[in-house]
Amino acid sequence: MTDVTMDGAPPAAAEPVAAPAAAPAPGTFLYKHRLVTRLWHWTNVVAIFIMIGSGLGILNAHPHLYWGSYGANLDPAWLHLPHWPGWMTIPGSYNLSLSRRWHLFFALILAFNLLFFMVFSLINRHFQRDLAIKAKELSPAHLWYDIKEHAAFRFHDPANPGAFNVLQKIAYATAIFILIPLVILTGLTLSPGMDAAWPWLVELFGGRQSARSLHFIAMLGIVGFVIVHLALVILAGAWNEVKSMFTGWWRVPEEH
């Protein structure tokens, strides 16, 4: 028997509803990391490693940090650091001139690598598509849920396992848009040549000694990011994560 409405007319056809897209099954390979991202990542691995080692070698010349424009042996420092052992510095023995050469050369690589990555990430919409933080993701409930998921070693959304979670987005945004630019700009402020060309940099950071302190703090932030990043790579499956950063293809894990 045909259904009719109360006025005797047949009911209107229902609007078609699109079925939700099925989540990728475990074992599926997703193209997660584009070539530009992979080149930027591995260039940063080399540049940051050498810059940290050479930076510690430079710091050994005067391991004290100050605020303001001036700082010397008799001035009160806010932080006294130890002399770093040779196995942590580049080169392995104290050589201020050589440490500076290593540091400045790879500082240029770090800066232009960041510029290259930012330009191409805007062109291919990597920032907008993968790293943009939505307002709802910053709600306390969403953040707390993501923290609990990480604490339970569940790093991927079962409905969209290839997507970055909000904690990843916040960490990457902090590194890309705050820590690396800060370490580059404060490093430029420490160069006498840049002082003459861009004196506003010294004023921006409140003096060369303040810039030196901020340079060290930004470096600590980058080191912290690297440590957490490596720990999560290991917990999420080191082989799958590292291989995807070489090939671009990431395998959906068996357990989301």
Image (cartoon, helix red, strand yellow):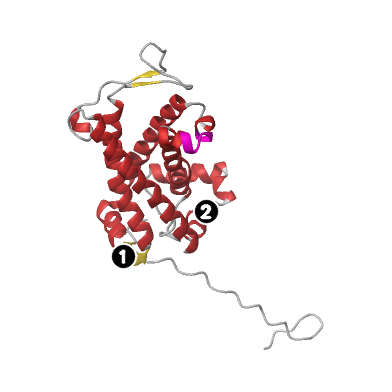
Give the label on residue 27, or none. Answer: 1
- In which quadrant of the rendered view does residue 7 lie? bottom right
Residue holding disc 2 = 132
Question: Can you give x and y, in whole percent of width and height, for residue 84 in the image?
Answer: 24, 26
The residue positioned 36% from the left and 65% from the top of the image is 30
Sequence-wise, the earlier of marks 2 and 1 is 1
Q: In the rendered image, which quarter contains the N terminus? A: bottom right
The three-letter amino acid code for the residue at tag 2 is Ala
Is label 2 or label 1 in front? Answer: 2
Give above or below for 227 relative to 248: above
Determine the CA span between mark 2 and mark 1: 27 Å
Q: Residue furthest bottom?
A: 1
Which residue is rendered at x = 44% and y = 34% of the image?
189
Residue 245 x %, y %: 31, 57
The segment highlighted magenta reads: 196-201
Give the secondary structure at mark 1.
loop
Q: Is residue 14 left or right of residue 225?
A: right
